[in-house]
Image (cartoon, rainbow, N blue to C red):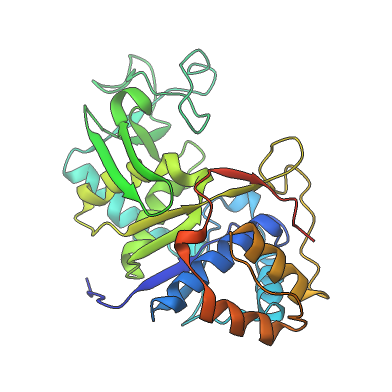
Amino acid sequence: MKEFNRYRGRFAPSPTGPLHFGSLVAALGSCLEARARGGEWLLRMEDVDEPRCSKDAAAGMLRTLERLGFEWDGAVMVQSRRTARYRELLEALQAAHWVYPCACTRRELADSAPAADGAAIYPGTCRAGLPAGKAARAWRLRVDDAVVAFDDAIQGRLTQRLGQDVGDFVLLRADGYFAYQLAVVADDADQGITHVVRGADLLASTPRQIYLQSRLGFATPAYAHLPVAVNARGEKLSKQTLAAAIDSAAPAQALLAALRFLGQAPPDGLADVGAVWAWARENWRLEKVPRAQALPASTAP
């Protein structure tokens, strides 16, 4: 695999709806950190969960980003076009006996303890083999007693005991689609991503990704998890929580709101997109980002 010595960051939204304030925060933080480090900033559409995503939503996101003044390097990567690569990696893990077939349904796992991200901690039902009369539905990665620790540039030290905190996790889903964890690890490796700047809603997933990287022989990027924007009820801004689309008719105001959310202090009087970007590139400081996993989007336009 090609080695990349230069900083390479990325923004990887799931195109399930229009770009909202929470997505803008992730895009802006990742882009400014890449530019401040003299690096490249790539764009990826994480549509591996195809039933929830749409090409129209992806196209709309790209148009909004362009109107907001974002510029990315290279072609946009699209996960739904990469299933052959994901299958290749799954087959390598199968050959190494790191994964096993699982017959469990969601109903059968309903009584399992919840993990940090809300999913059920897998109790290992099929680890020693499929129960009699059961057929494989999914493929899981065996984690055993692995302990993963890493230093996040914003959130600090995080340690996770995969076996007790998560359990063996799914790489190929029962519906035939590849899981996010496999897709994101493959994509980051193939794009040569050296630094991942994204929302703290994915913080609990990072140890799983680091563990999978080690099993596949991939390098581990540096991580920085930005605070997630939440509404008045404490819910993450998303399509499910009816987050409003960014008003691309007022791009400067949207960018300024995102900068303030990220702890930066742009001056009054930056009336146009060019002026906002010029100030942001010159003054961006990652260390000013609040060390919190969630913050109210009170400054959202």
Is residue 267 placed above or below 226 in the rendered structure?
Answer: below
Q: Nearer the viewer, residue 29 or 267?
A: 267
Residue at 22% over, 32% down: 146
Residue 2 location, x and y as percent?
23, 75
Residue at 83% over, 76% down: 249
Instruction: State the quadrant of the N terminus.
Output: bottom left
Instruction: State the quadrant of the C terminus.
Output: bottom right
Residue 295 location, x and y as percent?
63, 45
Left or right for 147, reference 250: left
Residue 110 location, x and y as percent?
53, 17
Residue at 78% over, 60% down: 245
Residue 300 location, x and y as percent?
75, 57
Q: Nearer the viewer, residue 53 or 248?
A: 248
> Which residue extends farthest left?
96
Left or right for 214, reference 120: left
Left or right for 67, reference 35: right
Query: In terms of image quadrants, where is residue 235?
Result: top right
Is residue 19 placed above or below 151 in the rendered structure?
Answer: below
Left or right for 29, reference 213: right
Whether residue 41 can be seen here? yes
